[in-house]
Image: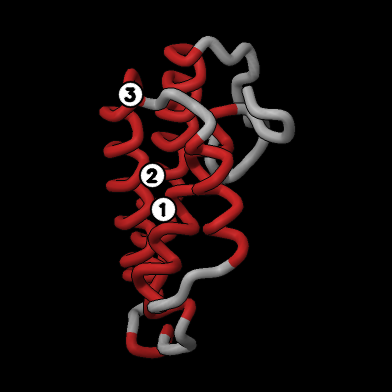
């Protein structure tokens, strides 16, 4: 665990910040902060989980891209519904991966969702 975040949460946010930086072509103080915090940790034992989280986030990014850009009218309601279910399932997967990562690192904090869309 870091001083401010459980490791799983830190890595999850770091991956999101990296993707935003890459996709939007900018480096923010957000991404710099997460990078500095992650540098203080030995994440070598969780490279598989990092790769899996990145894959999940990239998939979510792609599914949300038309919705985020205000072009949802290009999608049918059926397609929007399918994307919502896929995003929900990817978020469930993210929680499992984050908790597995935390356990491997020895962080006692796990994420638990109840009555949440990712449930």
Helix or strand or loop: what does disc 1 sit on?
helix
Q: Position of residue 77 (x, y in %)?
A: 40, 75
**Residue 16 pos. (x, y %):** 47, 55
Please tell me the numbered disc located at residue 87: 1
Q: Is residue 90 above or below residue 16?
A: above
Q: Which residue is at the front of the view, 20 or 58?
A: 20
* Residue closest to the far right: 4
Residue position marked by numbered label 2 in the rendering: 90
User: Mark 3: which secondary structure?
Assistant: helix
Q: Is residue 20 left or right of residue 3?
A: left
Q: Position of residue 6 (x, y in %)?
A: 63, 28
Q: Nearer the viewer, mark 3 or mark 2?
A: 3
Q: Is residue 104 visible from the viewing direction of this image?
A: yes
Q: CA distance from mark 1 to mark 3?
A: 28 Å
Q: Of the residues tagged 1 and 3, which is closer to the observer? A: 3
Establish if 79 lies above or below 112: below
What residue sits 65% from the left and 28% below the top?
2
Residue 64 coordinates in the image, percent (x, y): 41, 68
How packed is label 1: few (under 14 Cα within 10 Å), some, or many (20 or more)? many
Name the N-terminal-most of marks 1 and 3. Answer: 3
Assess whether mark 3 and mark 1 are in contact (beta carbons under 8 angstroms).
Answer: no
Q: Quadrant of the C terminus?
A: top right
- What is the crowding at mark 2: few (fewer than 14 residues within 10 Å), some, or many (at least 20)? some
| Residue 63 figure quarter | bottom left
Which image quarter: residue 90? top left
Callout 1 touching callout 2 (CB < 8 Å)? yes
User: Which one is in front, 91 or 100?
Assistant: 100
């Amino acid at each position: 665990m870091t001083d401010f975040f459980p490791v799983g949460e830190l890595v999850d946010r770091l991956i999101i910040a990296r993707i935003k930086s890459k996709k939007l072509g900018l480096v923010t103080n957000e991404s710099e902060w997460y990078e500095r915090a992650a540098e203080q940790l030995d994440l070598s034992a969780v490279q598989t989980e990092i790769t899996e989280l990145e894959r999940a986030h990239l998939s979510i990014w792609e599914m949300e891209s038309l919705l985020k850009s205000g072009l949802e009218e290009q999608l049918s309601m059926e397609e929007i519904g399918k994307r919502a279910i896929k995003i929900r399932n990817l978020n469930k997967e993210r929680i499992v991966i984050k908790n597995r990562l935390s356990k491997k690192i020895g962080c006692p904090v796990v994420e638990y969702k109840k009555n949440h869309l990712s449930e």
